[in-house]
Image: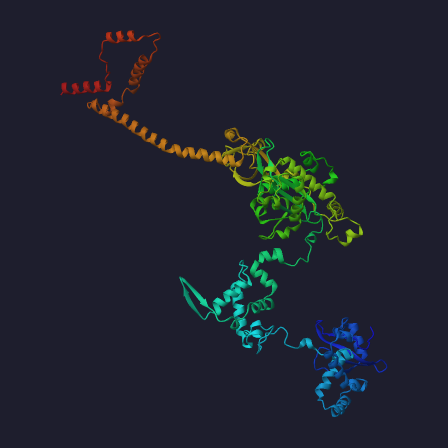
Amino acid sequence: MQVFENALFDIRNEESKLVDCERVLWLDQSQDCVVTISIINKNALPEFKRISFFEQGIIEGSIISREVDPYLRFMVPNEKLNEREIQIRDSSWDYIRELVEIEPNIYNPKERFQMIKGAMNKTGKGKEYYYKFLRQYWSGGKMPNALLPRFRKCGGRGKPKNPTKKMGRPRKTSVSTDPKLNGVIVGEGTRKIFDAIIREVYLKVNRRDSIRYTYIEMLKKYYSIGTRQKGRYEIPIIPPDYELPSIAQLRYHIRKYVNRRKQLIAREGEVTFNRDFRPLLGSETRKATGPGQIFEIDATIADTYLVSSDDSNLIIGRPVVYIVVDVYSHMVVGLYVGFEGPSWLGVMMAIENIVEDKVEFCKQYGVTITKEEWPCNYMPQTFYADRGEMESKNADSLGNALGIKLKNAPPYRADLKGIVEQQFRTLNLTLQPWTPGAVKKEYQKRGGPDYVLDAKLTLKDFTAMMIEMVLHRNNYHYMEYYPVDKDQAIDKVRPVARDLWNWGVAHNHFLKVIDPDIVRLNVLPEATVTVHREGIYFEGMYYGSEELLLQGGFIKGKSPKVVIAYDRRCMNYVYIKTNQGKGMIKCNLLSKSSRFMNMSLEEVKSTRYEESLSKSLYRTTEVQEEVSLSAKLETIAQEAIDRSVENEDRSLTKTERKSNIRGNKAVEKDKMRKEQAYELGKTDEESVVLEDNVTDIEAYKPKSKLGLLAKIKLEGEINHG
């Protein structure tokens, strides 16, 4: 690179940091000589250097040519200059006109001093004037306009002023009445009061108080000179208006010193600022580089009232609509319309629809399509949703089993899911003309029609309309503001969702093929349960499986814990997760729990609660009857004890009492047989006669042989002495 006159060069050190910037004033190729001056150093003077030094520095990279000249702003025609600027420039130019033409002598320090000394004798000006004008001329590119006055540096821009007289337009009172009534001067003390009241009132979060209110509070707090009693109120007294700062002065102070960003964050809150006021310089679409990298999912309440499919006279309210959108192509890849949610059940149905065959899905609602019209039955790399549904244990299975990342937007930041939010807005507005029962603002006027009574669509009808709208937006809607990238522009890809999807799938995608049953398994709620001998116990119900039985389950002493998935809408089955969520064992409700057949989990819990409540209410009766039973048994026992004591034969020994138990039992058995024997055809008269003819016979009481032997032995001992 050659060195030219008036060129600018940046001088950098070994760390590539800027050291200086020099302008070439004069050069002589034959003498390998160049004269430069620094435009950064305010006291710089011309220096002699070698051209070869510059050329070597350019090769090594320590000297770099600067393309933009900061003094180009002075290259303006006279028509754009005012008289004062032209006068100052021409006056300065007259001082140095003759000096700068003597090149290269003017660059030599000794000769330059003699030239300036001679000029000083003629004009009477000091040398500082000549050096100032020469530096401006040389640094500015050796043009007279470089001597233009630097008015922009005058006045202390950005620094607070302490004026000695009132600034701005005079008040009407000072013009018409008395010049002394011109108002107060805003000095340092007044500015401190302004700053304090702005912090205390105007910038208070979520208050949004007006400047007028702030001004009144300032007068009441900082300028009150006393109070007076008016009834039960204590009224502050303030000085006359001309002794107070005006509201215009406060408004000017706020406009000048309170940053707009700081003002919005303080008054609206940071969340509202980030959502409604932050700069929008990026593109949400560019967060994804291919289909399937990010799916956004969200729910809204549809602006339409529906009627029952069984009875059109019954209005059943507004449905919940879940939409899943691919960020890269803006393709709607999943849809759920129903009454679940916003909750995990609604998210579960929307995610299940992502992998569902769309041809069969549309067929259920009377819409016939081809595979190419809605080619979306894949899972993404990442789900982006609100903190509610996706920030739960139910969503963890998606990440753990299927390797899908879950990201949640911060609170109150729906703008971070702008693509899916815009889909909701568009679908709602577009469908309104064709949906009787739609919520419309004009219907809210007094005396206007009642949109609720206009409801005519069933859930199936509304779902079919939503499907048709989604198909239209996916296949034919031209997205005018879609940021088409360079590769797409080369291939002439139209900004239509299906075209972008197909192009992205062919070039770079993140889609995953997963069996719908595995997806359903991993979006169902989970629970950890124990396998007992009686079966798998969960919420008062028992489940069993032939497959698990063959594997050695349900054996006493072996009670492993397993993770099950269940559909709370119908508890006929639970599913044991295997292979880390990539497989399952289906378990049926056992007959011992058949009373819970075809019930939802909520119905099961309600039934069990009613049973528990009934048991609790019966507890009083049960305890009372147990007390009664105890009293009855105690009475019977006591009567037997009393009877036994009364009839006790104390002459019998313990051995005698325990002897002949078998014989005693036989006698008692024979007696019981006779008493319990059947007599068919027996009448009451016969039983009376028989009872009258019966003669009491003294019962034979056999005595123990041991007692007889003891008696004989005793008599023998007496007889033989």
For residue 258, above or below residue 615: below
Closer to the camera, 712 or 278?
278
Q: Is residue 432 visible?
A: yes
Closer to the camera, 547 or 353?
353
Q: Is residue 37 visible?
A: no
Provide residue 267's location: percent of width, then percent of height: 56, 60
Q: Quadrant of the C terminus?
A: top left
Provide residue 500's location: percent of width, then percent of height: 74, 47
Which residue of the protein is positioned furthest toward the right in this rendering? 30
Provide residue 282's location: percent of width, then percent of height: 68, 57
Residue 568 as seen in the image, left or right of residue 639 = right
Residue that appears at 63% across and 76% down:
156
The quadrant where residue 563 appears? top right
Residue 382 as seen in the image, left or right of residue 121 = left
Closer to the camera, 314 or 129?
314
Residue that appears at 77% across and 76% down:
78
Provide residue 414's location: percent of width, then percent of height: 61, 51
Which residue of the protein is positioned furthest toward the front in this rendering? 176
The quadrant where residue 132 appears? bottom right
Residue that appears at 22% across and 12% down:
698
The quadrant where residue 584 appears? top right
